[in-house]
Amino acid sequence: MLGEENNHTGVTPMPQGQVRVWYQSFVHPVEQAPYIERLQAQLDEVAGRGIRFEVHGLDPPDRSFHPLTEFRCAAQIIRHALDAEKAGYDAFVIGHFQEPGLLEIRSSLDIPVVALGEANLLLALTMGYRIGLVTIDPIFIPWHDRQVRLHGLGERVVGTTALEMNLPAFMKAFTDVDAYAAVRAQFVAQVKPLIEKGAEVIIPAGGLPMLLFARESPFIIDGAPVLNGIAVVAKATEMALALRSITNVVVSRRSTYAKAPPDAVREFCERLQ
């Protein structure tokens, strides 16, 4: 039964006639509830008519900045993605810039799968030739370098710089004017060397800074636009949905995203209980 299969995520079948998108965040749904609520409000604001983005958290969340944690989170969201498709969602968004599990999820679902990092990188290519990334912690710099190379964009990305900011400081900046000014100043300082290297478009590499700076429209530093990454991934999802309705194609099954056989999906779900 669908309800029995999805009890661990609280998924319920969707009403007919609604277009619903599962937006998978990597923060805890209770501990970071203020962020979840702000993210939901931002998605509600930018969503096209008739499309509903529904933000889901992760328990346990992505606390440790380590590849092992990313691997654990990837396994969790793969299961969430499978549940989302069974429940009738029309698309799935990986709302984490590093996009763990993207290959496996696209290979398993027949609905559009859109990733926060990939969507922003690809959109930035249409706005300028050289791109710069600013991440939330220095530990992520080599991670994003590998991510950029994996997407084949090494020649277009001038580099990645990093803020040194903890989660409480970010959360305070959402409501405190002085705290916001401090985060903004640090962000601008990290953008400057990227612009000196030739960056024409800046991507805040993470949902937290993307959401924080979405209040500035436009946000431009020395002529370089700073992407509103949440709006970008929302519109990329809407485009994927629209194109699916026109072409009846979601993804190539030729090689990279060859469809996972049913037995592989069943074994994965049975072992991940």
Image (cartoon, grey):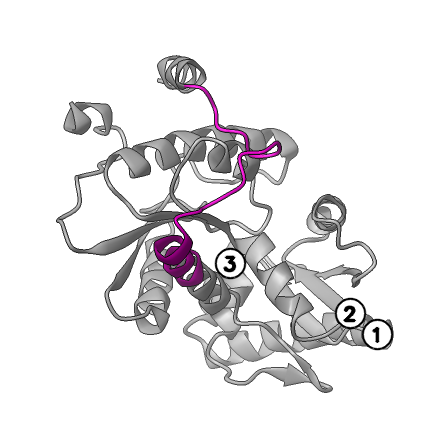
Find numbered disc 3 in the image and state the secondary structure of the residue it sits on: helix
Q: Amino acid at mark 1?
A: Gly
Q: Residues within 10 Å of mark 3 (few under 14, many from 20)?
A: many
Compared across the picture, whether 8 is left or right of 108 comes to left
Q: Return the residue at label 3.
A: 207
Look at label 3 and name its amino acid.
Answer: Gly
The residue at which mark 1 appears reads as 198
The amino acid marked with disc number 2 is Arg
Q: Crowding near pointer 1: few (<14 within 10 Å), some, many (20+)?
A: some
Disc 2 to disc 1: CB gap under 8 Å: yes
- Residue depth check, mark 3 versus mark 1: number of the one nearer the observer: 1
In this rendering, the answer to whether 199 lies above or below 75 is: below
Q: Are marks 2 and 3 in contact (CB under 8 Å)?
A: no
Q: Where residue 168 sits in the image (x, y, percent)?
A: 49, 58
Looking at the rendered image, the quarter that the C terminus falls into is top left
Magenta part of the chain? 238-261
In the rendering, which numbered label is found on residue 130?
Answer: 2
Q: Is residue 64 visible to us here? A: yes
Percent coordinates x, y for residue 45 in the rendering: 32, 73
| Sequence-wise first label, 3 or 1 | 1
Task: Say which residue appears at 51% left-offset and 58% top-offset.
Answer: 207
Residue 248 in the magenta stretch? The answer is: yes
Please indicate whether residue 178 sits to the left or right of residue 136 in the image. Answer: left
State yes or no: residue 51 in magenta: no
Which of pointers 2 and 3 lies earlier in the amino acid sequence?
Answer: 2
